[in-house]
Image: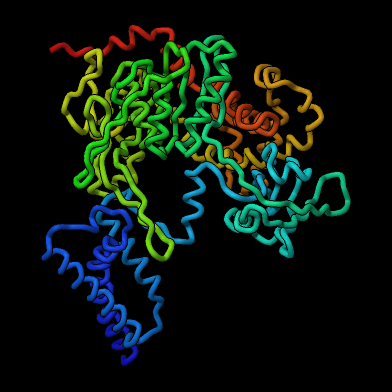
Amino acid sequence: MQQKNNRIQKVYLWLPVMLSIVLVVGILIGSRLTGSSASSTSNTAQMAAQRSSQGKVEQLLRFIESKYVDEVDREQLVDEAIESILKQLDPHSSYISKEDISRVTDDLDGNFEGIGVEFMILEDTIVVVSAISGGPAASVGIRAGDKIVQVEDSTVAGVGMTNAGIVALLKGEKGTEVEVGIYRPGLEDIQYFKITRDEIPIYSVDASYMISETTGYIRINRFRATTDREFIDALEKLETNGMEDLMLDLRQNPGGYLQKAANMLNQLFDEKGDLMVYTQGRSVNRANYKTTGRGIFNIDKIAVLINEGSASASEIVAGAIQDHDRGIIVGRRSFGKGLVQERYQLKDGSALQLTIARYYTPSGRSIQKPYEDLDAYQNDFNERYESGELLSENNISILDSTRYFTDNGRVVFGGGGISPDVFVPIDTSVLDPTYTKLNQYVANFSFNYFENNRNELSGLSIEEFVGNYQISSNTYESFIQYALEQAPKLAPEKVNNLNPKLQQQLKENIKARIGKQLFDDEGFYRVINSTDPMITSALDALKDYKNILKRKQFKN
């Protein structure tokens, strides 16, 4: 009983302390933000209140450290309090610990420092999928298919290494050395390579190629520091191959740097001074992003592909093109993120990603969806599926009934993403649970298949592979057997009775993965796109371009 009472007393002591920290640490953060407009105010009383609150925080922490019954981690308490405060604001304001700063910065800056390999964990072994051309690993002779079994003095094969653990071992400062032990099929002994780490680019453009005789295709995975330059390089290549029209694939693109999206849009508009997007916040003045008139490419028709995973900067691009009737938006309603974040460095090396403004498309619409209910916000895909929105254009939610108008007078709406001009329903068959489980084993099986058939496959050109190579019935059966061995819980009767359409889709997925081994991401996307209904719809839309842009005309 005494022990129970002690626990109760501990809880009563702890809760008010944590609540107090949560309530006041936000003010402490504000005072430490460098460059934040919130850190200066003409209100003397408010400044006094802030100083008083900061004193309370320090007092609370001192009491906890000196008097609390158990040992506590001061830094952890503060971190958790900050995160609790930010959860009360919006879904995109966030705290970045000093341990995560490098990872987050690398992803958006478009490079990191390491050895330059893409790998996968195959049966508890790290297998090199590709060594980045010109990178440190490729330069010393590491190639696809090599198995990394040792990093410095650490054995990494058969010990349950995670992706994060492997990355931590291989990444490091430019100029530092790391020794890796490689097992290469066909050789008995482990080969050791000393690799000098260097800057490794992270590319935004996954693929760019001519998808038809006159249409160039570009897929962008995120808006990073190098995206605008990569986009121009891709356009230059496509223009030399006869591009007249452009298909821009922004599906599942979560956004990134707003300025890079604006720079990219400059290449798609001829006139100077067209508004692309503007931002405005409570303490942030309106900022207009306009075209420069310096586009150097002669692009006729444009189709932009979006879906429920296209967010932020992707929606800026789609919104500008739609509002100015510069192109056709194909797919499904985008995510609906119209909030602008700025990063503020804190004294201990951590950072605050704080929402400071909303952005608005040229017609004046905000496309941010409601976020009062955070659970609903995060489960938006399920809501769209259950409401039938992913299956029918008639079920698209219009969250703001205010009418906005494109340059040609078409009606568009805000309040929850960009709605497409040409709707393409989701293929619900791929949500089949048996298919989903089988698809998890496609990458590993395909890698092994490629290794066993490398000589035969390496002689094919990309055109021959995409156009003629087929996954045979025997190969598919081998895949099913492999999947059943890897996942004993898979029901053989369900696997064997899988919808023929899904069986064919699995074959295409295997082929696409082999294509990636042969021709990098371009090989993968050429195969996947060849049977993608949204790609087909976009090509059809480009043929019916003028009629589509006349639809949904609103007359005053």
Q: Is residue 542 visible?
A: yes
Quadrant, the C terminus: top left
Q: Residue furthest right?
A: 188
Q: Is residue 351 above or below residue 268?
A: below
Q: Which of the 4 quarters of the picture holds residue 70?
A: bottom left
Residue at x 38%, y 75% (from the top left corner): 74
Q: Is residue 200 above or below residue 523?
A: below
Nearest the eye: 348 or 433:
348
Nearest the eye: 513 or 146:
146
Q: Which of the 4 quarters of the picture holds residue 132?
A: top right
Residue at x 55%, y 44% (from the top left corner): 111
Q: Where does the image place residue 15, in percent across and percent down from the top left?
A: 26, 75
Q: Where does the image place residue 469, in percent across and percent down from the top left?
A: 70, 21
Quadrant, the N terminus: bottom left
Residue at x 64%, y 42% (from the top left corner): 483
Nearest the eye: 512 or 269:
269
Q: Which of the 4 quarters of the picture holds residue 141?
A: top right
Relative horizontal placement of residue 263, taking residue 172 as reference (left or right): left
Relative horizontal placement of residue 174, taking residue 313 as reference (left or right): right
Q: Is residue 473 above or below residue 556?
A: below
Relative horizontal placement of residue 387, taking residue 210 as reference (left or right): left
Q: How is the image coloured?
A: rainbow
Q: Is residue 481 visible?
A: no
Residue at x 81%, y 30% (from the top left corner): 455
User: Across the whole image, how many numbered discs are drawn on residues?
Assistant: 0
Nearest the eye: 196 or 335:
196
Q: Where does the image place residue 425, in percent across and percent down from the top left?
A: 39, 25
Q: Where does the image place residue 521, in percent across and percent down from the top left?
A: 61, 31
